[in-house]
Amino acid sequence: MRLLFFVLLLCFHASTTLLAQERSPIQIFSPKDYGAESQNWAISQSSEKYIYVANNKGLLEYNGAEWALYLSPNKTILRSVNVIDSLIYTGSYRDFGYWKRNNLGKLEYASLSDELNIPFLEDEEIWNIINVNDFILFQSLKRIYIYNKKLGNNTIINSDSTIYKTFKVNESIYFQSVKDGVYEIVNGSSKLVSKDAVVQENLLVNIFSHQGKLLFQTEDYGFFILNENKLEGWDISANDKIYNNRIYSSIQLKDNSFILGSISNGIFHIDANGNLLLQIDQSHGLGNNTVLSVFEDVENNIWLGLENGVNCINIKSPYKIFNDDNGNIGAVNASILYDDFLYLGTNQGLFYKKYGTNNDFKKVGGTQGATWCLTEINNTLFCGHNSGTFVIKNNKAHKVADVLGTWTIKPIEGANNLLLQGNYTGLYVLEHVNGVWQLRNKIEGFDASTRYFEFFNDHEIFVSHEYKGVFKIEVDKALTKTLRITEETTINKGLKTSLIKYKDKILYTEKKGVFAYQPSIQKFVKDTILSALFKEQEFTSGKLVNDTKTNKLWAFSEYGLSYLTPGKLSNTPTLNKIPLPAFVRNDVSGYENISYLKDNKYLYGTSHGYIVIDTHMFQDKPYQININTISNSTYDEGYTTHLHNKHEFGKFKNNENNIKFSYNIPEYERYLVSEYQYKLDGIYDKWSTWSTNSSVLFENLPYGDYKFSVRARLGNHLSVNTASYSFNIERPWYLSNIAIISYLLLVLIFSLFMHMLYTRYYKKQRLKILLAKERELELKELENKQQLMRFNNDNLRQDIENKNRELSISTMSLIKKNEFLNSLKNDLQKITDVKNIKQVIKVIDRNLNNADDWNVFQEAFNNADKDFLKKIKALHPQLTSNDLRLCAYLRLNLSSKEIAPLLNISPRSVEVKRYRLRKKMDLPHESSLTDYILEI
């Protein structure tokens, strides 16, 4: 049995020592990724560019965005697959047939062997499927079934020995009968081609057409050419590798080179002349060392069905990858091709190898530690290193400056024997003396770390420091000290900024763009053309690289690399973009570096190796997006999903409003990331943001008409089409036409009913309103009376206040008059000539005791407080008129001193009167006479 024999082959192991090499990008798909078992026996591709894989669990389909598994119809291992026209033919245990896509976008299986009533032998499996003209051949280890597509019948070719493999060469079919020979199928019968000992004693992997002859490939002993019915060994340089490895699968590519899949050492790529181009195994990026099947797709990608997984190698990719899988080299900070050697400056030192070979990189002695720059100046290679500055000659390092941290080294215009370098602690000058470079001096007065600097003229230097900003430093002619340091305040400082000179312009780059220094106004101004190198929202680093060899200015952003080249027909440079997103290039942000090699190839340093980019291999290809499936989900005792025909207008019930669209572009470039953008007219009329998700779910959509549209972007190119799907979601039952008519009837009935109610209600309300109006009028009349009463009270209160003021004025007038008269009297009494003044004193006494004054006061007092004298007379009938007069003064809250002149007596006499008045009123000792009178 072939399977048993293959198991025995797995026990064979050949070990090899691999050299460092650059390889094409590889996509690795594990069983977890595609959701099936590990072994994959055959691979094919449809006209839509979908990939199909025969897996132990069933048929795998990959559309560039997602995998789908279709279980084996009889629950056995699928051994073979071949896409012929629009059908996917598969072979398994005692069965073969085809898969066809239905209107819902899913594959359905039809058993061709059941239709043809094939009488399978015991334990027979279909290992290969070949299409020739109108015939399809299904090969097992015992038979070959030939199916005529036009007539719908079949013939069978039997073999006395095991049929190991079947081969298609041009339009001819060959097969190997184990230990017998190789036969060709001619007119439905087998015809012997060779019974050479080579084919009798060895198992064939494949048969190819090579330079007009048949080329036989064995599992263990390489290639043989059929020459005049005799097999002769093909003497090629790759035989040393091939002889040490058992080959299980192989293919001849469109460029006539060969891919050989081994049992234990991955694949070998051999050119048409038999030279080994490369070997890739698990230690160099392959997913597994055992290659069960090999396939070349329409875009020259190599697909490998492995013992554990599926791999896709972009053999025609513009990218070649070198991964430092063992961590011996580290992150690449700088690179240069010098004297036909490739040098890498990394965080671990300086490494080199002969360019164009697969030799291992070797470390330059004495360069352990971080290397920051590699610069060729006047045919001398300088290395800026953490421990100082080196000159590299014959792959050896010679330290010329023992100053820590050399960031960069630049020539000084007009002084070929001098160089200027930026270090951790400022600027230093190197001098060429007697054929040797050596440190001359430090430029005193500036001690900041100088990673970026550029000459503005022979005595002014711009320096950029990420934390401190940009400075213009004026130095003396001898470059020994700074004369003046000026900080540039017109630009923003910050991390991942840079300073560079490009076409005699000083450029400063930060998140908001590229700024060029304008000498006329002495400040940096944003350059709109150069700022197109990256978008602000895609900013990852302001690092720019000026490649003087090719006159390119490079920039780096989230979605790729950009470079400017001089315009061919104008002074406006041309912007070019390379789709290499940050998440796949794995660089060290802020330390991006790229250098020119040769033949349009550039080396881009990454955190674990480098990528070689061939700018001439980029092709503008049309990309077409497809909507794969349309499904909706409803909840009815659990979520259920239904698929729908994408070619028909969609009609969904109202509860079927969770709709999912899956879409894809069948593109398999490792570093070409598919991004999608969609909109849903009817609710989301604007395009969404770009996303790598190949499906979208719209939940709880309201009823209405919709049109879903989706487009794609790969690198810099939009898809040539926009895929769309129109559909309608029905109104809910409560908004259906019947429901609306019912609502109208209910509203009409309700309106009539309410009209009757309101008629009765308004009659009652009219009566209530009339009663309320009458009551309101009564209340208004009462309110008017109260208001009139308040008005009268206010007038009375005003009168009382006026009377009180008159009483106060009158009282004060009396007091003042009597005080004046008493004072005048006292003065007159002091005069010795009494005769002459007696008559005057009599007149004064008459005025002091004038009853008219009391009458005037009494009238004013009664106007202000007319009931008081009556009340107190009623309470105390024994009071005399003088007593009532004293009570009136006390009612005004006058003091004894104020009352004395009114009564024309002394204050002491007033106190005596007060005492007698208390006696007459019979007041308790503790009671206040004044308080008592005020309270009446």
Image (tube, rainbow, N blue to C red):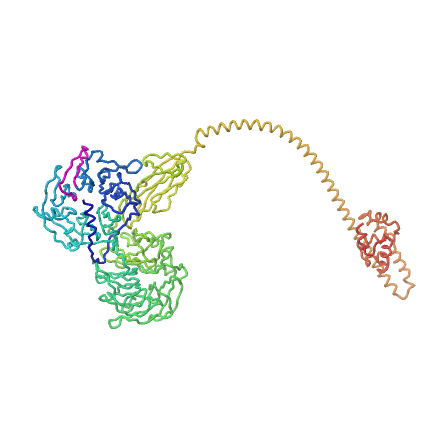
Residue 54, placed above or below residue 834 = above
Residue 471, placed above or below residue 158 = below
Left or right: 201 as drawn, with respect to 918: left
| Residue 301 seen from this side | no
Q: Residue at x 64, y 29 (%)?
A: 767
| Residue 329 seen from this side | yes
Residue at far right of view: 835
Left or right: 590 as drawn, with respect to 135: right
Q: Position of residue 579 (x, y in %)?
A: 30, 51
How many numbered discs?
Answer: 0
Looking at the rendering, the stretch of residues picked out in magenta corresponds to: 142-165
Quadrant in the rendering for residue 410: bottom left
State yes or no: residue 163 in magenta: yes
Report the front residue among 322 and 82: 82
Residue at far bottom of view: 434
Report the front residue among 827 and 262: 262
Q: Position of residue 259 (x, y in %)?
A: 19, 50
Left or right: 353 as drawn, with respect to 425: left
Report the front residue among 388 and 902: 388
Report the front residue among 782 and 218: 218
Q: Position of residue 59 (x, y in %)?
A: 26, 42
Q: Quadrant of the N terminus?
A: top left
Q: Position of residue 703 (x, y in %)?
A: 41, 36
Left or right: 436 as drawn, with respect to 931: left
Residue at far left of view: 228
State yes or no: residue 650 in magenta: no
Quadrant in the rendering for residue 427: bottom left
